[in-house]
Amino acid sequence: MPPKSKQRAVKAANKTSTEPLPAPFTAAPDELNALLSTFDPTSVYITHVDPHPAWFKKRIFFVPVALNLGLVLLLLWRAYYILPHYWDILMSVLGNHNETTIYWVRTPWGSLIWKLVKRMTMFMIDFVLFRIVGPWPWSFFAEQPGNPVSWRWKLGFRDEEVYVRVSRGWGARDLLGATEGASGKAGQESPFFKTRILPAVDKTRLKEKTGYLLMDGDFDLDFYGMVAATQLLDHKDITLDQLRKSVFVYVGDAEADNGQWAVWDCAKLDEGSETEARDKVIQFKDKLTAMGKESLFFRWVELIQYESNAPGGFTLEKQVAAAEKVKKMFQDQGVDFEEFSKELDGMPGV
C-alpha cells in the first residue's frame, strides 16, 4: 500500500460563511462538527457505509497484511545482509582498504567497468527497496494519525462499516473553481465534480467493491477519520444516515476562520432510483400477469438472480449475455421482449 502524503492542516469549525454554497451542496449539520474537525479543509471527503459481510472484509484485509509482512521480512533480511558490505565500502572510502576497495591503476578496464556496473546496480536496487518500497509497510503499520492496522485494531470487522475517503492530488480549491487557471465553475458545474466525485459515488461501484478496495489515484482512505466516525456512531453522537453516502467540502478561508463545511447528501439519489426500479418491477409483473404470463415473470427473476450472483460478479459481458437469454425466454413464450419493454418506457435500473 503506497504511503499517504496528506498532512492534517487547519482544523476548521463549521461556521456560517458569506461565500455562497455551490449546488448541490448545503450547510453540513452541526451534529457533524466533531467529525469535521478531524478533516483537512483543503481536501474533499466522501463517506459511505459498506454493507459487505464482516467475513468478506476480513478476507480482503488479510491480503495486504500478508504482503506488508512479507515486505518487512524482505527489508530486514536485506539490511542484515548488506549493511556490513556498505560499512566496508565506507571504510574503504575513508582510507581503510579492504575487500571492497577498487584499485583503479592496477585493475584492467574490462574488470573495472564490470565492478562499477555491479556496484551501481546494487545501489539502485537498495535505493528502490528502502526509499520507494520501504515506506509502504511503515504507512500500513505505523503511520500517524491513522493507519490500516490501528483502524482494524480499534474497530475490528463489522457488517456495516463507515468509510471515509479523502481526495488525493487535488482538493477543495479545484472543486470550488478557485485554483489558478481553473474555469471558475464550482460544485456540480466543476469538471472535478464530474470526473472525480460522480465516479467515486457511483452506486454500482460501491456495491461491487468493499471500501478498502476503493483507494485509487483520486482518493485515499482516511483511517483516522474512519475511527473517529465509528466512535461517534458508537456513542450515538451522530447517526448512520448522516454518513450513508455524502460528499464534504470546506467553503471559505479556513485559515481566516471564515467558512463552513458543506455536504452533498447523495444517498438520497440512490433511494429515489431504487424506489423507481421497484415500481418498474411491479409494473413488469402486473403486465405479464394481465397477459396470463405470470410464470414468465418468476422465471425471469430466477434467471437474473442466478446470473447476477454467479462467481466473478455481474459484469457488462454477463449482463449482455443475460439480456440475450431473457429475450429468448420471452420469445419462447410468444412475447417480444423489445416491444414489451418499450410499453413500460424501458427498463432502466431494473
Image (cartoon, rainbow, N blue to C red):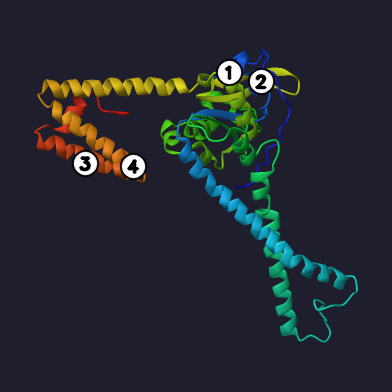
Q: Nearer the viewer, mark 1 or mark 4?
A: 1
Q: On the image, numbered disc 1 is attached to which residue?
A: 238
Tell me, for residue 324, which label it has, or none: 3
**From the viewer's perspective, is 258 left or right of 164?**
right
- Residue at the right extreme, as displayed: 95
Is residue 249 among what the camera can see?
yes
- Identify the residue shown where x is 65% and y is 18%: 33
Front label number (3 vs 1): 1
Q: Are marks 3 and 2 in contact (CB under 8 Å)?
A: no
- Label 3: few (<14), some (14–19) or many (≥20) C-alpha neighbours in 10 Å: few
The span from disc 1 to disc 2 (Cα, nearest Å) is 9 Å
- In the displayed structure, 125 sits above or below 118; it is above
Figure check: 108 above or below 73: below
Q: CA distance from mark 3 to mark 4?
A: 13 Å
Closer to the chain start, of discs 3 and 1, is: 1
Are the residues at dot 3 and dot 1 in contact (C-beta closer than 8 Å)?
A: no
